[in-house]
Image (cartoon, rainbow, N blue to C red):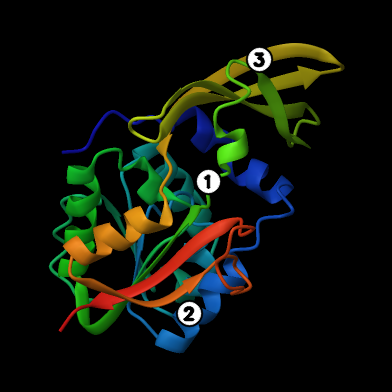
Amino acid sequence: MIEEDSYIVTSKHYDASYTAKTNLVDIPFYLPLAEEDGGPVLEIGCGTGRILLPIARKGISITGVDQSRSMLSVLEANLAEEEESVRSKVNLQVGDMRNLDLQEKFSLAIIPFRPFQHMHTMEDQLAALASVKRHLANDGRLVLDMFFPKFDKAFSGIGEEFLELSWENDDGDKIERYFRKDSISKVNLSFTGAMIYRTYRNGKLILEEENELTMTFFTYPQMLALFKLSSLEIVNTYGSFDKRTLDDSSPEMIFEVKSVA
């Protein structure tokens, strides 16, 4: 089941905002994985192609799946600007990671930049892992990342707005992106909030747009349990995209898993 598209606002600003986010360092992690593997690659939550396109430019076949039609529309426009040699390597599908049926096997599946954190119940989490597992070839691997929760900050700042990014659009307008955390659930380990986009022209606010979101955060033991229940075996675990050991100071939890024989 494809739910209502919740990324209509965010898709408009996604590429510009993450170009402005200079500390985003996951492409140098995922691109060598795809090159070493050789493909075909399955990317779940491919969005506007921030990671998919660099992989395709290396001549690697990749299928991108996203639940958001608006995000895929931006990706299709981006893909149209690429050479045919790149376009021919890409297959795009609208789909829900919980019930994929692509009729294809992949040697590498990736879920980069935290789409798995939009799985809010154990049923959804297990369904997503089972769905991806069905699409793995023999010895195929799944690699996914999520932020390592900062419990000292998780329950603070409710209702406050924080300026995250700012950039200029093609018209010279200044756009600022704010984040507001509206609530947090200790029971479900999830929070609700909103991305707020404000556009200024000559210093005057001319447009305000908001995209609500809900994200679940995971503990390390919780992920171990989900993998065990899904008959997935951990190959590697990292605490950052430069492959540092996972410890209490780590900003990320990155897992590479494979099917248990």
- The answer to the question of whether label 3 and label 1 lie on touching residues, with beta carbons closer than 8 A, is no
Q: Earlier in the sequence, mark 3 or mark 2?
A: 2
Which residue is tagged 2? 33
**Front disc: 2 or 1:** 1
> Residue flagged by tag 2: what amino acid is it?
Leu
Is 107 positioned to the left or the right of 211 in the image? Answer: left
> Residue flagged by tag 3: what amino acid is it?
Leu
Q: Residues within 10 Å of mark 3 (few under 14, many from 20)?
A: few
Q: Nearer the viewer, residue 77 or 128?
A: 128
Relative height, residue 146 to residue 181 (above, below): below
Which residue is tagged 1? 149
Q: Nearer the viewer, residue 101 or 91?
A: 101
Q: Earlier in the sequence, mark 2 or mark 1?
A: 2
Q: Quadrant of the N terminus?
A: top left
Q: Residues within 10 Å of mark 2 (few under 14, many from 20)?
A: some
Q: Residues within 10 Å of mark 1 (few under 14, many from 20)?
A: some
Number of numbered labels in the structure image: 3
Mark 1 residue element: loop
Residue 216: x %, y % from top left: 39, 39
Is 77 positioned to the left or the right of 131 in the image? Answer: right
Is 160 positioned to the left or the right of 107 in the image? Answer: right
